[in-house]
Image (cartoon, rainbow, N blue to C red):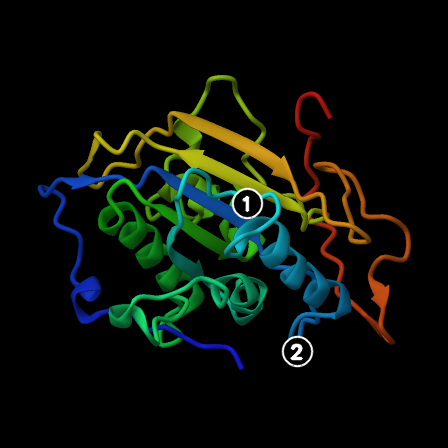
Amino acid sequence: MRTIGVLAACAGVFLNLTAAYALPKRIIILRHAEKFEKAGLCGVGEKRAQALATQYLGYGAKDSLFANGDQPAAFYANTPHAEETIEPAFSTWPKSPSQVGKAIRFDTTLDLNTWSRKAAKEVLTNYKNEIVVMAWEHSRIANAEFDSKYSTDPLTLYQLLGLFNYKHPPLPLQNWCGSNYDYFWIIDYDPNVEYRGVPPTPVNIVTRLQKLQVLPQNTWGSQPPHGVFKHDGGECDATPKPACTPQQGE
């Protein structure tokens, strides 16, 4: 069964904008895997979650996103589908005695918008020079419509984590395409730069296709292979919007 972590009490305190916090060195963002709207992950999504653990995000993964002895300091999720997506990877990592029982950080007592905002602040203020994995619902990763609607109280990771500040070279990150379940956004920061409540500027952003065997690998902004959502006796929910411009070079 999934494990659900609740924020530590101190994380409920509002961020003091005069305080300075060292940034994490990397945040790895991915969308939850393919799903059923009213239930859990569908067959394709369950296979993706397991494949992500063995190939990219788990301990000893074949093409690990953690190099040179690095390991994730925390896994975050903002929906049950997102939690299911990263639970297989999370469960592979050995834990010290003080970490036994440590769970994926997902506060189910908060509504989706409130938790997304609080989680982003917590990630930027509590993981100095560490790596954090965030599995998120796509419209709260990047959604130009939300950015316009919530312009005075940003909601998306694109705004909250300062991705909009990255312009070298410019990347089409304003929307997470409804058709794509198969990408990582890897965001690097200078951990020597202090965070004081203003969205930071990443020093590098890489978009990376998940090359997982027998699973959808449609390039950014393109549609999944025909019939991919009809699997294992059920039909996964497709998400047609938003449509996105393909990444440069794809």
Judged from the image, the secondary structure of the residue bearing numbered disc 2 is loop
Classify the position of the N terminus by image quarter: bottom right
| The residue positioned farthest toward the left in the image shown | 18
Q: 151 or 203, which lies in front?
A: 203
Q: Which of marks 1 and 2 is nearer the N terminus?
A: 2
* Residue type beneath disc 2: Ala
- Please identify, in this view, whether the residue under mark 1 or under mark 2 is nearer the observer: 1
Which secondary structure lies at badge 1? loop
Q: Quadrant of the C terminus?
A: top right
Specify whether 193 is left or right of 220: left
Q: How crowded is mark 1: few (under 14 residues within 10 Å), some or many (20 or more)?
A: some
| Front residue (pair 38, 6) | 6
**What's the residue at 58%, 34% (across, down)?**
207
Decide: few, some or many residues near mark 2? Use Cα within 10 Å; few <14, some 14-19, many ≥20. Answer: few
Q: How many labels does the image show?
A: 2
What's the residue type where badge 1 is placed? Answer: Ser
Residue that mark 2 sits on: 39
Q: In this view, does 120 lie above or below 37?
A: above
Residue drawn at (57%, 69%) of the image: 84
Pick whichever, 51 or 7, lies toward us: 51
Q: Residue at x 57, y 51 (%)?
A: 61
Seen in the picture, residue 22 relative to 233 is either above or below; the reply is: above
Residue found 67% across the figure and 22% down from its top: 248
Residue 242 drawn at (x, y percent): 66, 45
Vertical arrangement, residue 226 with respect to residue 22, above or below = below
Residue 117 is situated, as x and y percent measured from the top left of the image, at: 35, 55
The x, y position of residue 75, in whole percent, is: 42, 59
Question: Spatial distance from mark 1 to mark 2, Cα to Cα?
Answer: 30 Å
Q: Residue 13, position in %: x, y?
A: 16, 62
Q: Which mark is residue 64?
A: 1
Q: Dots 1 and 2: beta carbons under 8 Å?
A: no
